[in-house]
Image: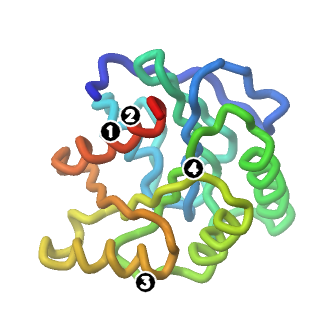
Amino acid sequence: MKIKNAKFLTSAPTIKECPDLNLPEFALIGRSNVGKSSFINSLVNIKGLAKTSNTPGKTKLINLFNVNDSFVFADLPGYGFAKVSGKTQNLWQKNLENYLLNRTCIVSLIHFVDSRHELQNNDVQMAEWINFNKLPCFVIASKVDQISKSQINNVCKNFEKQLNLEVLPFSKSNSFYNMKILDKIEEIITA
């Protein structure tokens, strides 16, 4: 699959405000600052399309992006550390669960984990929740440019064992990994 165009569509606080776009949707989930927005920018090759930040918790809304007029990325607020109140985090969690369970156009979740670190408890809990709810999902091991090339394969295999989900490596600074990810997305939307 080749990306020809991509555009930001809208931001919405809850599923109710999200338009029905009649396109297959990929919901991007993961810890705050794991690289979901950088993933979108790199994959579609448009710098700054999705807003990135070094501060955890900057994504507060559901951000929808149309890619090739053939599918949508939904960039969701991250879980884990964010400089927001417990009340706000609980609201995000409730909205996230509602979105993932009730948004009918979702064809797959893309669960992001940081390749530089061991899995966090909330990464494992999210994978268990995904598996329990039988939601289609694959995992992106982000930031592989920050570990040695010899570690990448082992890290991905280790994550696959722990999460019981397929894991693909990704680096925003090396487009080498993009083709395999795009092939996976195409396989899902044409199935």
Amino acid found under the numbered disc labelled 3: Glu
| Image height of 76 relative to 54, above or below | above
Cα distance, mark 2 to mark 4?
14 Å
Cα distance, mark 1 to mark 2?
6 Å
Q: Residues within 10 Å of mark 1 (few under 14, many from 20)?
A: some
Q: Residue at x 26, y 44 (%)?
A: 178
Residue at the spot of label 4: 109
Residue at the spot of label 3: 118
Horizontally, residue 93 falls left or right of residue 123, namely right
Asked whether the residues under the numbered discs 1 and 2 touch, taking CB atoms below 8 Å apart as contact, a structural biologist would say yes
Q: Residues within 10 Å of mark 4 (few under 14, many from 20)?
A: many
Q: Secondary structure at mark 1?
A: helix
Question: Residue 78, how many percent across, how many down?
Answer: 61, 57
Q: How is the image coloured?
A: rainbow
Front disc: 1 or 2? 2
- Using the rendered view, name the quadrant where residue 63 is placed: top right
Give whichever of 84, 99 is nearer the camera: 99
Question: Residue 138, how many percent across, how many down?
Answer: 47, 56
Q: Residues within 10 Å of mark 3 (few under 14, many from 20)?
A: few
Amino acid found under the numbered disc labelled 4: Leu
Horizontally, residue 137 falls left or right of residue 39, namely right
Residue at the spot of label 1: 182
Residue at the spot of label 2: 186
